Amino acid sequence: MGKKIIVTGTPGSGKTAILSLLKGINIISLGTELQRKSGVERDKIRSTMSYKDAKAFRKNVLREIDSIKEDIIIDTHTSIKSGDRYIAGFTKEDTASLHDVKGIVYIDATADDILARRAADKSRRRNNETKQEIKEQRGVNISLATFYMQELGVPLYIIKNKQGKIEDAKEDVEKAIKTMLANE
């Protein structure tokens, strides 16, 4: 089995944009894998399956990801906001499904930057959230990332992705990944 690094962040933080700039490491989007294997649009998977079925389905997909022999980055959301509730994008059971996780990278951005990126992203339908709601989601997500760090016993890197500074964030992510993969 290869080493794994979990990269997560609030939707609109620039996580996927940064990951698209990285070279030389396999990046697997958990949401895309779930969509590909289920045939259901990624934002609707949880609403089309029972909780029990969705949980079993995720476990099987994660088992396949865990068996990959090369080093990989797992791109996933920390949480998904649905109305007034949050759903963990990556659960305690998910962390138990993976072996040889070397660390977590949380891509962070200000609420203003996230709102601007979400407004510009025409590929996804998102609610018109306020700055206060984004701040709340960031707080929930950092709390969850801290929980994952503790559960897995790995370091957590919080990388700031400032508007117009994606290259700086990419370099910081590369440095964190190199450090984590080098640590045995």
Image: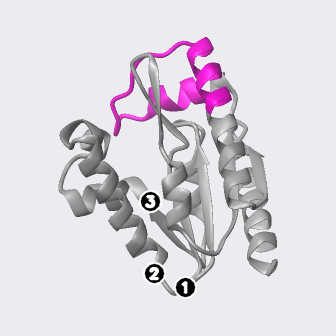
Q: Nearer the viewer, residue 174 or 1?
A: 1
**Location of residue 41 with respect to 167 vertically, above or below:** above
Structural crowding at the residue carrying mark 1, measured as other residues with C-alpha within 10 Å and reported as few (<14), some (14–19) or many (≥20): few
Residue 118 placement (x, y as % from top left):
48, 30
Under tag 1, what secondary structure? loop
Q: Nearer the viewer, residue 50 or 79?
A: 50
Structural crowding at the residue carrying mark 2, measured as other residues with C-alpha within 10 Å and reported as few (<14), some (14–19) or many (≥20): few
First in sequence, mark 2 or 3: give its number.
Answer: 3
Structural crowding at the residue carrying mark 3, measured as other residues with C-alpha within 10 Å and reported as few (<14), some (14–19) or many (≥20): some
**Left or right: residue 165 compared with residue 60:** right
Q: Which mark, residue 67? A: 2
Q: Nearer the viewer, mark 2 or mark 3?
A: 2
Give the Cα distance between marks 2 and 3. 15 Å
For badge 3, the amino acid type reads: Ser
Residue 20 can be seen in this image: no
Q: Which mark, residue 1? A: 1
- Residue drawn 75% across the image and 61% down it: 154
Residue 94 placement (x, y as % from top left):
49, 57
Q: Which mark, residue 9? A: none
- Residue drawn 35% across the image and 36% down it: 124
Q: Nearer the viewer, residue 62 or 39?
A: 62
The residue singled out by tag 3 in the image is 29
**Left or right: residue 147 compared with residue 2:** right
Question: What residue span does the magenta drawing correspond to?
Answer: 114-140
**Location of residue 105 with respect to 43 vertically, above or below:** below
**Left or right: residue 2 compared with residue 161:** left
For badge 1, the amino acid type reads: Met
